[in-house]
Every structure is written in structure tokens, then in C-alpha cells.
Image: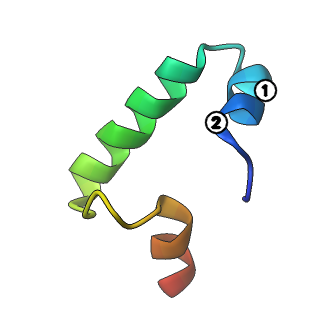
Amino acid sequence: MGLSNREISSILNITINGVEQAKYRIKKKMRIEKDISINDYIKDI
């Protein structure tokens, strides 16, 4: 998507911290390493 946390938070009407927590939970469920971005992981699929 290429959106920053700030842009995502304004679209979803949640805090920036909420976006970071959601990304952390998704990465944990998908067993993605911390240094890999979600966007890069999805693009590789």
C-alpha cells in the first residue's frame, strides 16, 4: 500500500499507536520476523 502509520491512522480513525499494535499482532500471527515489513512479505507471495 505504501501508506505511513499516520495516514493509516487517519483513515481508520485510530491512534498511531493502535496502528503499530495491529501491525505487530498481524506479524506475530503470520510469524514474520520483526525486520521484514508486511508490504514486502505480501509482495513476495
Q: Residue at x 64, y 36 (%)?
A: 5
As measured in the structure, the alpha-carbon distance from the residue carrying label 1 to the one carrying label 2 is 10 Å
Residue 20 in the image: x percent, y percent?
A: 46, 32
Coloration of the structure image = rainbow
Which is nearer the eye, 3 or 11? 3
Q: Where is 25 relative to 36, above or below?
A: above
Q: Is residue 17 above or below residue 37?
A: above
Q: Position of residue 2 (x, y in %)?
A: 73, 58
User: What residue sits 77% from the left and 33% below the top?
Assistant: 7
Residue 14 in the image: state x and y as whole percent: 63, 14
Residue type, mark 1 in image: Ile
Kind of residue at badge 2: Asn
Mark number, residue 20? none
Q: Is residue 40 left or right of residue 9?
A: left
19 over 29 or under it: above or below: above
Q: Are marks 1 and 2 in contact (CB under 8 Å)?
A: no
Q: Earlier in the sequence, mark 1 or mark 2?
A: 2
- Mark count: 2
Q: Which residue is mark 2?
A: 5
The residue located at (43%, 41%) in the rendering is: 23
Residue extending farthest front:
35
Task: In the displayed orientation, state which residue is furthest to the bottom.
Answer: 44
Q: Say which quadrant the N terminus sits in.
A: bottom right
Q: Residues within 10 Å of mark 2 (few under 14, many from 20)?
A: some
Name the residue carrying label 1.
11
Label 2 element class: helix
- Left or right of residue 29, residue 3 in this image: right
Above or below 3: residue 25: above
Q: Nearer the viewer, mark 1 or mark 2?
A: 2
Residue 43's image quarter? bottom right
Label 1: few (<14), some or many (≥20) within 10 Å? few
Local secondary structure at mark 1 = helix
